[in-house]
Amino acid sequence: QETGKGAYDHYMLKEINTQPTALKQTIEGRLDVEDATVDIEDFDRGTFSEFDRVQFVACGTSYHAALYGSKLLDDVGVDSTAYRANEYDTNTGPACPDTLVVAVTQSGETADTLKAMRYAEADGATTLAVTNVVGSTAAREADHSMFIRAGPEIGVAATKTFSSQVVSLALLSRQFAMDFPDASPRADFDELAEALARLPSDVETVLDQSNARTIANRYVNDDAFFFIGRDLGFPVAKEGALKFKEITYQHAEGFTSGRLKHGPLALVTPSTPLFAIVTGRHNEKTLTNAKEAKSRGAPIVLVTDDPDAHSDLADVGLEVPSTHPLLEGLLANVQLQLLAYHAADQLGRSIDKPRNLAKSVTVE
Ligand code: G6P
């Protein structure tokens, strides 16, 4: 793995641009497209056949990957909930032996996430760490580990590790679907497998063709930035807003599109661009909600695989290639990474080391 920034101005930009390689590493040797099967490390068929439900615990960007993963599990009939690790002990009853607690943590060292894992273990749950760092505390303490193999990430704002986490969880969802007694494996896993294998080149297309820089320049000095989405678009909206606020220091919020009318709409003005994630599925209501913001004068940026379909609504689009509906959100997220990066660059921010933030938070 090449270290240093190379030709890039920032580690973050390098890490965004090397996502195709990171994703290939995540997938390599684990996915057989022809047979539509997964083979993850030492997880033999049946490794997870004792469990009834999954609880994810994670913080920050990893929490958004967990939210995405939880939707992927819903889709194969595996009961799951994503918890912010810092609130896990106050939000759940005791975990039990038929619960698999999946800690999603890039570093494997986040104190809140380790604490949640230990809390679950003490109650008899089995733990699985999905992490980037071999030998990390999470990997050592968990009953099982899956490594996302994204390569070292230096920028404080997580980018390539989010993509690799989600793809790891997509692979795990197949394993769980085959193992969990009550699961119902997707009939179209062959199509999903093909789309996973194609994902690195789809990300490459986004990187080559993105107009995020122009959009960032147009809106960067506005008052606030809202990101909305439903279903798989929701974690993408949350992550888009997190990335934006982390490195631009501008106010950004991400929420389910349906929430807009229950409060946030009061903040909408011609100086609050609204980024609507309309990739994947269940987009009708997001489009309706975006129209409500447009009628209050907000500029509308649609992240979509079909810009022509919505040209009357969008002031401008961030386009992504069409792929399997479960994966389009990942491509949307790459556009939002670039948006945040270029906005922060335009503002001259300390992109790789944003003020007050740490790559890994080892205190509770
Ligand atoms: C900090 C970092 C975030 C990261 C989060 C979780 O807040 O600034 O970028 O997403 O910790 O880190 P982890 O290593 O557990 O994924």
Image (cartoon, rainbow, N blue to C red):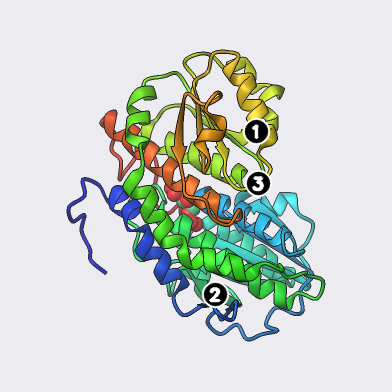
Question: As drawn, is 285 to the left or to the right of 331?
Answer: right
Confirm or deny contact between disc 1 and disc 2 (CB under 8 A): no
What residue occupies the far left of the structure in this picture?
7
Residue 344, relative to residue 92: is it above or below?
above
Question: As drawn, is 350 to the left or to the right of 84?
Answer: left
Question: Looking at the picture, which amino acid does disc 1 mark?
Answer: Thr
Confirm or deny contact between disc 2 and disc 3 (CB under 8 A): no
Q: Residue at x 61, y 53 (%)?
A: 325
Residue 75, relative to residue 235: is it above or below?
below
Q: Which residue is mark 3?
A: 281
Question: Which quadrant holds the N terminus?
Answer: bottom left
Residue 308: image location, x then y, percent:
51, 34
> To which quarter of the image does residue 297 belong?
top right
Say whether disc 1 or disc 2 marks the residue closer to the N-terminus. Answer: 2
Q: Spatial distance from mark 1 to mark 2, Cα to Cα?
A: 36 Å
Confirm or deny contact between disc 3 and disc 1 (CB under 8 A): no
Q: Residue at x 42, y 64 (%)?
A: 23
The one nearer the camera, 347 or 334, is 334
Q: Which residue is mark 2?
A: 145
Disc tally is 3
Residue 12: image location, x then y, percent:
32, 49
Q: Which residue is mark 1?
A: 286
Q: Nearer the viewer, mark 2 or mark 3?
A: 3
Residue 4: image location, x then y, percent:
20, 58
The tag on residue 154 is none
Question: Looking at the picture, which amino acid does disc 3 mark?
Answer: Arg
Provide the secondary structure element on which disc 1 rests.
Answer: helix
The one nearer the camera, 340 or 75, is 75
